[in-house]
C-alpha cells in the first residue's frame, strides 16, 4: 500500500484511507523492497525525479521495523504457499495481532486465516 501512496498509483486514495492515522510496522526487509520497487519503476520509464521524490517521501515516514522470526516465517511460507518475503509480513501481523494492509489478495486471505487461527 505504501508504494501506491508514494508513487501516486491509481489505488492511492484507498491506500491512504487504509493507513491514515495508524502506526506503521514492517519487517526489516522493507527498505530493500522499496529500493527494488524504485529500480523497477525506473526501468519501466518512470522519471528519475518521480522515483527520487517517492524515495525521499519514504525516508520521511516513521515505520517501526521488526526482525522476523525466520523459523516462523519459513513455516508460514510453507503453510500458505507464500514467498518468504510475504510470509515476513504475515508473521508480523500475527506477532502484533494486527490487521495486514495489502493489495495482495492472496496475502490478505492468508492473514485473515492466520489471525483467526494462528497455530
Image (spheres, rainbow, N blue to C red):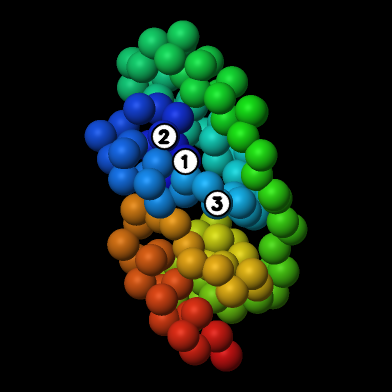
Q: Nearer the viewer, residue 40 or 100?
A: 100
Q: Secondary structure at mark 1?
A: helix
Instruction: From the image, tell me which residue sits under label 3.
Output: 22
Q: Secondary structure at mark 2?
A: helix
How far apart are the alpha carbons under marks 1 and 3? Answer: 12 Å
Q: Residue at x 54, y 35 (%)?
A: 34
Q: Secondary structure at mark 3?
A: loop
Q: Are circles 2 and 1 on residues that touch, CB within 8 Å? A: yes
Q: Residue at x 51, y 16 (%)?
A: 53
Q: Residues within 10 Å of mark 3 (few under 14, many from 20)?
A: few
Residue 50 location in percent, x, y? 43, 15
Instruction: From the image, tell me which residue sits under label 1.
Output: 2
Q: Residue at x 57, y 90 (%)?
A: 119
Note whether 41 is above or below 75 in the view shown: above
Residue 85 location in percent, x, y? 55, 56
Instruction: From the image, tell me which residue sits under label 2.
Output: 5
Note whether 47 is above or below 119 in the view shown: above
Mark toward the start of the polypeptide (2 vs 3): 2
Nearer the observer, disc 2 or disc 3? 3
Q: Residues within 10 Å of mark 2 (few under 14, many from 20)?
A: some
Amino acid at each position: 500500500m505504501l508504494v501506491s501512496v508514494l508513487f501516486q498509483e491509481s489505488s492511492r486514495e484507498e491506500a491512504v484511507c487504509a493507513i491514515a492515522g495508524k502506526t506503521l510496522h514492517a519487517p526489516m526487509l522493507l527498505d530493500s523492497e522499496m529500493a527494488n520497487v524504485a529500480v523497477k519503476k525506473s526501468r519501466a520509464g518512470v522519471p528519475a525525479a518521480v522515483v527520487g521524490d517517492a524515495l525521499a517521501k519514504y525516508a520521511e515516514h516513521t515505520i517501526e521495523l521488526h526482525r522476523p522470526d525466520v523459523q516462523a516465517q519459513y513455516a508460514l511460507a510453507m503453510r500458505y504457499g507464500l514467498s518468504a518475503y510475504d510470509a515476513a509480513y504475515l508473521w508480523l501481523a500475527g506477532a502484533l495481532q494486527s490487521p495486514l494492509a495489502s493489495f495482495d489478495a492472496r496475502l490478505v486471505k492468508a492473514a485473515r486465516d492466520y489471525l483467526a487461527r494462528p497455530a
